[in-house]
Every structure is written in structure tokens, then in C-alpha cells.
Amino acid sequence: MLIAINRVMAWTEPEEATRERFLEVIKGFDTGILLTHKRDGSLHGRPMALADVDSDGVLWFLTRVDSPKVEEIQSDPRALVTCEAANQFATIEGHCEIARNAQKINDIWKESYKVWFDGKGDPELVLLRFQPDQGEYWDNSGTKGIQYAFRAAAAYVQGKKLTPGANDPQTHGKVAL
């Protein structure tokens, strides 16, 4: 049960564990696919370096002010971010906004961004602030993946279908943010 009072969230214990695990998983990704809506309503996706993830799940990306995604976000801020790496996956629904914040750029700047920009002060550089509304993650990395493989093998040998186990926030969860 989620209780919202003036945007302050109170979580039950299982929901808090799922929320914390979700944040832990998404903070481990370096890139994501950002999907936005073109003017005709179709989807447009592109890989983006994930510059930062705030403690409340807000994702930050850097882009050029004249990029098509800026126009798409200004026309329709709804967006989806998907991430995948080493048997971990996440989908995050939310909305984007364009931001100019020199302090945030300075805080998240990496030297590798010079491939796309003329430094932190590049006048074409803007931030994309992705505010998540809800997310879902799957984590079969490490020992969790081995446990999943054993369950799958046992189901196969027994001629049964693999059934999901009890809701284990370590391996899968849905969260409203």
C-alpha cells in the first residue's frame, strides 16, 4: 500500500525493499535506451549515456539543444527508459524535461563527454531530467542467476513449466515512484 501526502511517500516494508532494490539496480547501469514520441505519435529510441541517478530515481542525461529528442520531449514529455546489462534489466516509465543547470552539469560531468560537447560550458549542452512514475526490474545476476537456472532445469526435468517464486525483491519488482 502506497500512501502519498504532499509528495512525501510512506512505504510499507515490502514496498520499501522493492523500491530500494529498484534504485540499486538502476544505479548500476551506464547506458539506457530513451524512447520518446515523435510528432506523428510513433516512438523514437536511442541509446544514451546515463549521467546520474538521484536518490529518488530521477535519471539525468546530457544532450545537444538542437537534437531531435529535445523537440520530441517539448512536444510530448512522456518517455520510457530501458536498461540492460549482465542479466539485469529495467524498464522505467516517466516524463522528461529539458533543464539548464550549470551546477548539475558540473557535478555529473565526465571527461568522456568531450566526444559530444566542447566542455561543460558548451552553449549547446542541455540536461534531460527524466522523472520516473513507475518502474520494473529483473535481476538474474550472480547467484540469483544460478538459482534461476537450477529452478529452470528442475522444471524441465520434471516436465513442468517454470513458475515464478514468491515475490523476491532481490530478483524482480514493480514500483511506483
Image (spheres, grey):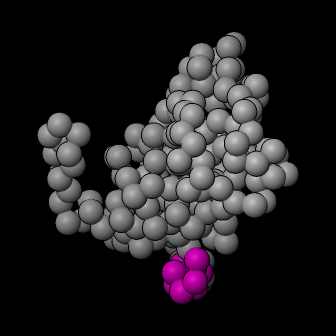
| Range drawn in magenta | 141-149
Image: 15 above or below 81: below
Q: Is residue 128 left or right of residue 71?
A: left
Is residue 44 visible in this depiction of the protein? no
Is residue 117 visible in this depiction of the protein? yes
Q: Is residue 19 left or right of residue 50?
A: left
Image: 29 above or below 32: below
Residue 30 colored in magenta in the image: no
Percent coordinates x, y for residue 51 in the rendering: 62, 54
Percent coordinates x, y for residue 37 in the rendering: 64, 24
**Residue drawn at point x = 17 percent, y = 53 percent:** 10
**Residue drawn at point x = 81 percent, y = 44 percent:** 118
Which residue is at the front of the view, 77 or 18?
A: 77
Q: Is residue 47 left or right of residue 61?
A: right
Percent coordinates x, y for residue 162 in the rendering: 51, 70
Image: 123 above or below 153: above
**Residue drawn at point x = 43 percent, y = 61 percent:** 23
Residue 66's quadrant in the figure? top right
Which residue is at the front of the view, 163 or 62?
A: 62
Residue 146 colored in magenta in the image: yes
